[in-house]
Amino acid sequence: MSMLNKRKVYDITMQSLTYLSSIVSIVVLLAIVFFVFQKGYRLISWDLITHNYQSVTYTADLKEDQESGTFISTKTFDDGSFYSTKWGIAIKDDENLIGGTSVFITYVHPDSPLNALNNKGVGIEDLSVDVDYQIIRVAFDGASSALAIHGAEHMIEVWDSQDSFRELEFSTTGGGIRGSIITTLYLIVLTLIFALPIGVGAAIYLTEYAKNNRFTRFLRQMIETLTGIPSIIYGLMGLAVFVPLTIRLTDATGANIISGALTLTVILLPVIIRTTEESLKVVPDDYRYASLALGASQTQTTFKVVLPNATAGILTATLLAIGRIIGESAALVFAIGTAVKDDIRLTEKSTSLAVHIWSMMTDEPANIELSSTIALIILAIVLVLNISIKLLSKRMLRKQGVKK
Amino acid sequence: MNDSIVFNVKNLNLFYGEKQALKNIEIPIYKNQITALIGPSGCGKSTFLRALNRMNDLIDECHLDGKINYYDQDIYDQTMDVIGLRTHVGMVFQKPNPFPMSIFDNIAYGPRCQGIKDKQKLKEIVDEALKQAALYDEVKDRLKESALSLSGGQQQRLCIARTIAMKPDVILMDEPTSALDPVATLKIEDLVVELKKNYTIIIVTHNMQQAARIADKTAFFLMGELIEYGDTSTLFSTPQYKKTEDYITGRFG
């Protein structure tokens, strides 16, 4: 009787422990997501994603073939905007990022002459104004300048009374993370192009061709060990090997996206090799035998039968790889740098989303809000990729007739 | 008469590492006949079958000595084209193992591997193979469907069709009905008898009634040795050896 009771108590205790651990892990995960969401959701907007990071101030005047006219807008401006029919532009007073008041563009008529401006300073020649840009100053020949500090209403009044202006000073919107998103996408594509063929190839060699001997076992052991190496060490390697290599082969002058992708490739190879190997191993030997017995060569068997049946696993490997690419920061600090950029070139420094968070947090004071927003965006990207790859592999399995 | 011998096996010894799986096998296999290999589990009959198209090569530790002549060619000769051999000597396995692709692609797989790309020709080969495997009427409207949607018996006949599509000379069958129900089994048996007009068939079976029903010649294996080989009717009615008699009367095995 007591024996039975003892066992019962033991059973219940052990069961409760498993319940408890699963609850703890779920709570921790939810807490993280909640924290990120609660901190970051306020800043999330389409503008953040599409805008440049650096705000640039330009001084411009009209191109020679442009002049004022009458631009009737069908839009009604009831949000405090003032519209100039002569110039086809609506502006309003609003709070800027540092808490002061600025004049913001809320609408630009498609035919407005302000769509074709001449840069009077250095840099690109052709400029145009766009919604959310700030107007700092408009200078005229026949009137005193309209300044932002005098408000939008005054600015429109003066502007409307003039047929031309000498110069317009405006600044583009900043604070966006478009550059970092593009860098991240470049990194994903490039790294997968490098890493998938090599990784899958190595996995095929190890499972299909290599004899199970000392050398193969040693190789596997090495690969397994490589998965455990901290990524900052790979980053050092990227700096020591890939950065000089890319400088030699391309017009890069320092750390760049290609060297970053190569570094990530090295980081990902062990992951891809192992996952692919696992998925190749579960392809039934029956298929291999059937193929060989039909007079197919080993290579035909591997590429026509075994590999297609491992696609789901290889997609999983890809997914893990993408997750790692998006999440990697330590290695990339060395391999592509931490410069937040808007004009993304493969052979120049820039920063991925994760490194962007890192640089936001090393700012003084740390920008937790923007970091959390970027984190949210990363979460969303991972989620979307995850779901789409799941759907893809499901579709493939259905095509093969495997019910799952 | 010598011409009608397809496989001539002389003094064959086969080892898995240290363990000897086949001992001094001597057996001629005759053309356009069904030869059944019977014996208890682990007696070496499947091993022997796989030696005939060198599928044993895939097992790391396996090595053999002796001679297996396919017509007048030693198939274990250094210069032997193993892939070529397997196109002549096809194989059907115990468990139906169609590839997870369409019915058409399954059958076209072998010919495609040989470099046949012409769609019209592939279509002819597939139709012909399906007809010979008595599967055509059941699947002719669903060739694009996955082979895994077929029933077990249909899948096995598809595997036979897949082998036939290679236009082989010999078909090796390793217990092709052991995973099937009695009705599907009968269908396969009928098919095998039908196929012997065009092919030489060697079939491993656990089912002695099956051997008695369809085979022309029967070979009884025990512990890696070939105990008795002869006409099926003789072997089952008047076995020469006590061991054979004990086995076929069900006293062991």
Image (cartoon, rainbow, N blue to C red):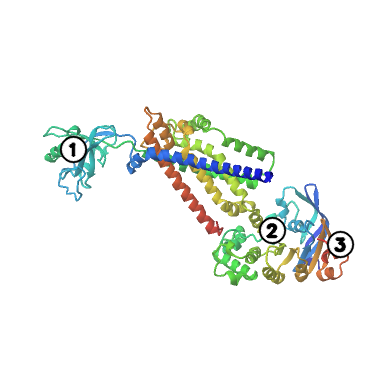
How packed is label 2: few (under 14 Cα within 10 Å), some, or many (20 or more)?
many
Q: The residue tagged with tag 2: helix, strand or loop?
A: helix
**Residue linked to disc 1:** A152
Q: Measured along the vertical axis of the image, is residue A383 above or below residue B94?
A: above
User: Do the numbered discs 1 and 3 sit on residues whose CB atoms are within 8 Å?
Assistant: no
**Residue linked to disc 2:** B86
Q: Decide if residue B153 is on the left or right side of residue A186.
A: right
Name which quarter of the figure residue B209 lies in.
bottom right
In the rendered structure, the residue with mark 2 lies on which chain? B
Q: How many marks?
A: 3
Question: Type of residue at label 3?
Answer: Lys
Residue B47 percent coordinates (x, y):
76, 56
- Nearer to us in this view, A209 or B169: A209
Q: The residue tagged with tag 3: helix, strand or loop?
A: helix
In the rendered structure, the residue with mark 3 lies on which chain? B
Residue A198 at least partly seen: no
Closest to the camera, between mark 1 and mark 2, is 1
Residue A315 percent coordinates (x, y):
52, 48
Residue drawn 13% across the image and 41% down it? A160
Name which quarter of the figure residue B178 lies in.
bottom right
Q: Measured along the vertical axis of the image, is residue A202 above or below residue A166?
A: below
Residue B39 percent coordinates (x, y):
80, 61
**Residue linked to disc 3:** B243
Residue B76 percent coordinates (x, y):
75, 53
Residue drawn 80% across the image and 49% down it? B19
Q: Spot the residue most to the top.
A: A364
The reply to the same-chain question for discs 1 and 2 is: no
- Nearer to us in this view, B252 or A321: B252
Closest to the camera, between mark 2 and mark 3, is 3
How packed is label 3: few (under 14 Cα within 10 Å), some, or many (20 or more)?
some
Name which quarter of the figure residue A21 lies in.
top right
Distance from Cα at disc 2 to Cα at disc 3: 34 Å
